[in-house]
Structures are given as C-alpha cells and as structure tokens.
Image (cartoon, rainbow, N blue to C red):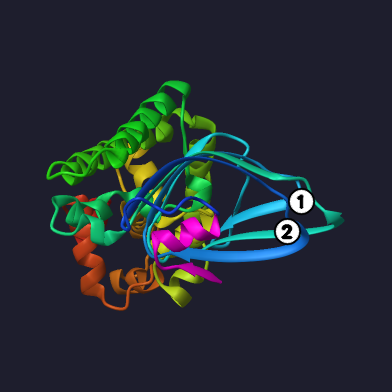
Amino acid sequence: MKRFKTIREFHQFRQLPAPEHPLISVREVELAKQLPAKESMSWCYDFFCIGLKRVCLSPNIKFRYGQQPYDFDEGIISFVAPNQLLSLSIDTEEEEIEEIKHSGWILLIHPDFLWNTPLAKTIKKYDFWNYSLHESLFLSAKEETTIINIFQNIQQEYHANIDQFSKQIIISQIESLLNYSDRFYHRQFITREKVNHYILEKLETLLTDYFNSEDLINKGLPTVQFVSEKLNVSPNYLRGLLKVLTGQNTQQHIHDKLIEKAKEKLSTTELSISEIAYELGFEHLQSFSKLFKAKTNTSPLEFRDSFN
C-alpha cells in the first residue's frame, strides 16, 4: 500500500509541479496513463482530498473504495478523509489496456492547515467524509459550475501573494464548498428516486426477514453496521438518506420494526412479556419495557390489557 504522508509526496508521485504551499494544493488536472495488464494498487492519504473528476475507464479496470466497486463514467465529486483506503485492480489477458483518462479538479488539505480555525473542529461534521466512493455526489451541470467556481476562487487566492488574509479567505471558500456539497447531497437523496427507494425496499425486507427469523434470539437486535453492510451502503450515507426521505435514522427504523413485532406478539399470543422480550433479543425485561414505553407512551402490559 502506498501512503502519502505529505502533499508534496503526492505531487511527486503524480509528476505534478511542487505545491506552492506545503499544507494545501488545488489544481485542475488531466491525466492519461497506460497501465500494465495485471496490476493492483492501494493507497491512502494523511490529508483530506476533494476530487471533482470525470474518469473514463476500460471495462477491465475496477476501481474500489474499501471493498466497494465503482464505475466512474460520470462526472462526480468525492471526499476522502485522512487514513481512508482506496484501491485500483486490473486483471485482463491483454498485455496492455487502454489508457485511464482522468480530468477535473483536485483539492488537497492537510489537517495542519486548518489548525486554530473553526473549520478544524467542524470539518468532520459533514457525513460525506465517511461515505463510500460508490456513494459519491453526482452533480448537475449547474451544480458542477458552482463547485468549479469555488475551486477557481481557491486557486486564485492560492496563487496570489500570501498575506494575512489569504488563509482565512481560502478557509471560507472551503467551507462554502463543503456546505454546497451538503446541500447537493440532500438533493441527490431526493432526486435519485429509483436507487434510493430500492434501498428503502431492501431495508424493509431485510428487517422483516430478520425479525421473523431466529436471529433475534441468537444474535440480538440488528445493529446499524449490520444493516448497512447488508444493504451495501455506508452507515452515514444510509442515515442521511433515511433522514431526508423518512425523517428517521437507521436506528429508529430498527426500533419501529421491533415495536411492530412486539405489538403483534402482545396482541396475538399468550406469551408472557418476559418471553416476548427474550424472543425480541432482549436480555433484560426492563430494557424492553423502557423502549416500548418510550415509543408508544404505554407499557407492554397496558398495551396487552387494551385488547382484553
């Protein structure tokens, strides 16, 4: 695995001119590179990387973020936080594949550049730093223009004579970039209706099957991480998507399914409340009763008595 500890190392590896500042770099890039027929590369950064890119890949190339494959046929913007792993794998019988072509913008920000600024504390509040690469942001033409204008503003200040205002101006532009991206992600949750509602349908099926199986007794309540892995999305992306589309996060959906199942057992079986709690994955009756009361404003016993 290749680890880029400094922005200068990244520039050298990509055969770019040396950065004008050791802790930040912004460039418009265009790359065409021939790769060998069999190659696997993994790398990570010790700095933040924001890339607005359009990459044309041969069908033989598979780009991965962690374990997730993604096809870069469309213009997107992606966000990579320090220490996140990326990889590129190629496996073909040809001696040499077609060029990998990459154009767009790239912004590299070392955490030290943010030191002693409000952004140092708030930059991690943006959930998309923890999204998988296949959850990158698809930009409309208008949105792409907005983002490119911000890159250009940063570049203009980056190449200007450094003075006491330079850093704060760049920081404010980075904040604008992050805030616009946050807005556009919320738009994406709504407009990519087919994909997102497919995830909602899979979530409903997954939880229904889980609560109808022996997994509740054997494994306990499903976790957010378990649900996300089964749906092939990152926990933060799933939480953001559900919050926009349904007003509830993943944990709330799990609890709603739990209460639905509890009501069914309380109203249609002769099981004791302790037995129901056990079948729903609770080790302690008090924990079940507390959650049920919080969700329904009534205790399990009061709910059952309402049917008698």
Which segment did they paint magenta?
1-14
The x and y percentages for residue 4 are 46, 66
Q: Is residue 106 visible?
A: yes
Q: Are marks 2 and 1 in contact (CB under 8 Å)?
A: yes
Q: Is residue 179 above or below residue 92?
A: above
Residue 110 left/right relative to 63: left
Determine the secondary structure under disc 2. Answer: strand
- Which disc, if any, is residue 193? none
Residue at the spot of label 1: 60
Q: Which residue is at the far front?
A: 161
Residue 86 left/right relative to 62: left
The x and y percentages for residue 3 are 48, 69
In-front residue for pair 163/275:
163
Looking at numbered disc 2 in the image, what kind of residue is underneath it? Ile
In-front residue for pair 163/203:
163
Pointer 1 local density, CA inside 10 Å: few below 14, some 14–19, many at least 20: some
Which residue is found at the position 25% from the left and 74% from the top? 285
Residue at the spot of label 2: 90
Determine the secondary structure under disc 1. Answer: loop
In-front residue for pair 259/43:
43
Looking at numbered disc 1 in the image, what kind of residue is underneath it? Asn
Residue 227 left/right relative to 38: left
Which residue is found at the position 35% from the left and 45% from the top? 240
Residue 52 within the segment the image draws in magenta:
no
Residue 4 within the segment the image draws in magenta:
yes
